[in-house]
């Protein structure tokens, strides 16, 4: 049910604010690379930099200038608005912080928008390549304005897959290493880029055929899953059940190799 002050907003208006915010945050990151930034340790291998905070602030400023009542869930700041708005923006201001801190050019800004709990907009911006991935529900997915779609690979022997590892890799047995070993022996190639939002976009664009990860957060996935679905891809949990960005598991693919990925993940399932 919509609230009196919280009128429905055309999705192309939301998309243009999300795009503006992502590009501005990308410029913040690029400037931080040029001028330098401080690194802090949240945990032993989990970093945060000035750039994460500055980019996040810029995104929130852009959103709240346009939509002061909207809720925002941002990685570094948590849930910033407790208003009963229908809209929630889910933000990773810098996905790929470890890469960024090492000046390895694989990182991005990720901004998703939910309306009534459903992901309707996804924007992911890679400032080092100037690649902007966008999608509005029902309108397809785009890379720098050109339509994108998933690959047609239909066998793991022909598939280039990607995965990632969470920061608790040393503390839990459910750390994805078992799946990694098993997939490595079944696929054409297996990569770990260190940026889940771009991994999803690369499946959407047909650069990868599939992606899985054991423990992700809503801000890693919110934009990318909208982009992937709009590009014709499939996303579920490890059992093939509907995906939620508030769950941890993610299996994303071109659709054709999805069942093969699920079968392999089930084969060596680790009790959590
Ligand atoms: C991380 C990256 C990485 C994934 C981790 C995420 P961050 O996000 O997306 O690829 O494997 O699970 O936490 O910390 O760079 O924003
Ligand atoms: Ca992230
Ligand atoms: Ca981040």
Image (cartoon, rainbow, N blue to C red):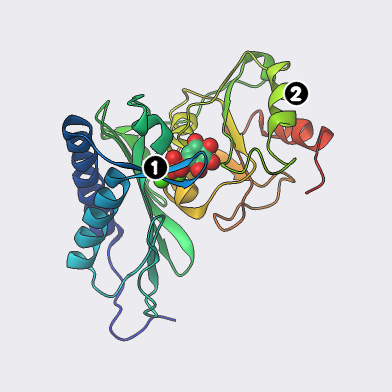
Judge by depth and name the residue closer to the eye, 47 or 114: 47
- The circle on residue 182 is 2
Residue 74: image quadrant is: bottom left
Compared with 190, 62 (above or below) is: below
Viewer-nearest of labels 2 and 1? 2
Q: Quadrant of ligand 2?
A: top left
Residue 70: image quadrant is: bottom left
Q: Position of residue 251 (x, y in %)?
A: 63, 39
175 vs 104, left or right, is right
Q: Residue at x 23, y 46 (%)?
A: 25
Q: Position of residue 27 (x, y in %)?
A: 18, 39
Q: Residue at x 68, y 35 (%)?
A: 176
Q: Residue at x 56, y 47 (%)?
A: 216
Q: The residue tagged with tag 1: helix, strand or loop? A: loop
Residue 40: image quadrant is: top left
Q: The residue tagged with tag 2: helix, strand or loop? A: helix
Q: Position of residue 266 (x, y in %)?
A: 80, 37
Judge by depth and name the residue closer to the eye, 122 or 99: 99
User: Can residue 228 be seen by looking at this rendering?
Assistant: no
**Which residue corresponds to mark 1?**
140
9 vs 162, left or right, is left
Q: Residue at x 68, y 18 (%)?
A: 184
Give the total of numbered labels.
2
Question: For the N terminus, which image quadrant?
Answer: bottom left
- The circle on residue 69 is none
Say whether mark 1 is within 8 Å of ligand 1. no
User: Can residue 185 be seen by looking at this rendering?
Assistant: yes
Q: Residues within 10 Å of mark 1 (few under 14, many from 20)?
A: some
Q: Residues within 10 Å of mark 2 (few under 14, many from 20)?
A: some
């Amino acid at each position: 049910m919509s609230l009196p002050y919280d009128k429905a907003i055309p999705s192309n208006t939301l998309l243009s604010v999300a795009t503006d915010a992502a590009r501005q945050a990308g410029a913040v990151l690029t400037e931080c690379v040029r001028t330098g930034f401080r690194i802090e340790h949240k945990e032993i291998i989990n970093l945060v930099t000035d750039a994460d905070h500055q980019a996040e602030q810029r995104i929130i400023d852009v959103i709240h200038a346009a939509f002061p009542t909207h809720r925002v869930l941002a990685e570094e700041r948590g849930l910033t608005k407790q208003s009963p708005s229908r809209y929630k923006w889910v933000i990773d201001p810098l996905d790929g912080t470890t890469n960024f801190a090492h000046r390895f050019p694989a990182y991005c800004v990720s901004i998703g928008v939910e309306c009534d709990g459903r992901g309707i907009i996804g924007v992911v911006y890679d400032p080092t390549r100037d690649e902007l991935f966008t999608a509005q529900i029902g309108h397809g997915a785009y890379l720098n304005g050109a339509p994108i779609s998933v690959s047609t690979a239909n066998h793991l022997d022909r598939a280039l897959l990607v995965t990632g590892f969470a920061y608790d890799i040393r503390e839990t047995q459910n750390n994805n290493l078992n799946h990694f070993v098993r997939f490595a022996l079944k696929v054409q190639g297996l990569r770990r880029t260190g940026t889940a939002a771009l991994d999803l976009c690369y499946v959407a664009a047909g650069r990868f055929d599939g992606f899985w990860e054991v423990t992700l957060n809503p801000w890693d996935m919110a934009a990318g899953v909208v982009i992937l679905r709009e590009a014709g891809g499939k996303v579920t949990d490890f059992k093939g059940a509907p995906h939620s960005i508030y769950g941890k598991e993610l299996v994303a693919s071109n659709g054709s190799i999805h069942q093969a990925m699920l079968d392999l993940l089930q084969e060596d399932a680790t009790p959590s």
